[in-house]
Image (tube, helix red, strand yellow):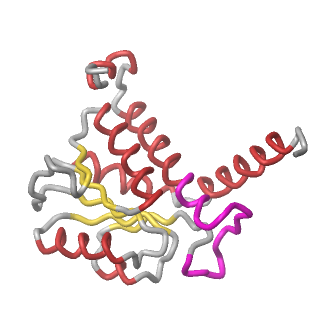
Amino acid sequence: MDKQLYNITSKIIITECEKALSAIDSEQVIDYINMVLSAKKVFFVGVGRVLLALECIAKRYAHLGIRSVIVGEITEPAITKDDVLIVGSGSGGTLFPVGIARKAKEAGAKIIHIGSNPNSEIRKIVDLFVRIPVESKAKQPDEIHSVQPMTSLFEQSLLLFGDVTSMMIVEDKRINIQELWQYHANLE
């Protein structure tokens, strides 16, 4: 294996992530943050690697004092009209997240979809769609192409989107980062 392969590959991935994050509509991001901050509880649903990225976002938001809930966890409370459900799904057609979104909508919750496909089946019930316009199963003509396997760029961009929005919240609320340690797990 070529010893330069790591440097070459990491530059490709970083470049792709930068291109994807730059393509997100900043107005959608502001609307997203406002919805998150106005909710009593913020629920997250996704599957596979998308769920892992959402779990990271939920944990970081919890560090910011936002009540974050992963759908399906044993301590999950009821969702209400005062809450937001964030659905992570590139295609917007993944069975489990779409079904959960329908149930949350019936309960009166606001629905945010973070995905790639603006023409997805979930679009009819969402209150806000934040598009990360990267290559997905939907194969939209304007998607950002990736040389990475499958939907890696979407999952990476989703994780970074969570970190970007967290920093924006810290900045907007003038949160002292040193004070965030009070929310960090201490049974380690």
| Residue 148, image x, y percentages | 69, 61
Residue plotted at (28% across, 36% down): 62
| Residue 168, image x, y percentages | 44, 38
In the figure, 17 relative to 105: above or below?
A: above
Give the quarter of the figure containing the C terminus: top left
Residue plotted at (50% across, 76% down): 117
Is 81 part of what is drawn in magenta? Answer: no
- 15 horizontally vs 167: left or right: right
- 32 horizontally vs 110: left or right: right
In the figure, 99 relative to 181: above or below?
A: below
Is 138 part of what is drawn in magenta? Answer: yes
In the figure, 182 relative to 60: above or below?
A: above
Viewer-side residue, 185 vs 82: 185
Magenta span dominant secondary structure: loop
- 61 horizontally vs 24: left or right: left
Looking at this view, name the residue that lies furthest to the front: 1
Residue plotted at (67% across, 68% down): 144
Magenta residues (range): 137-156
Label tally: 0
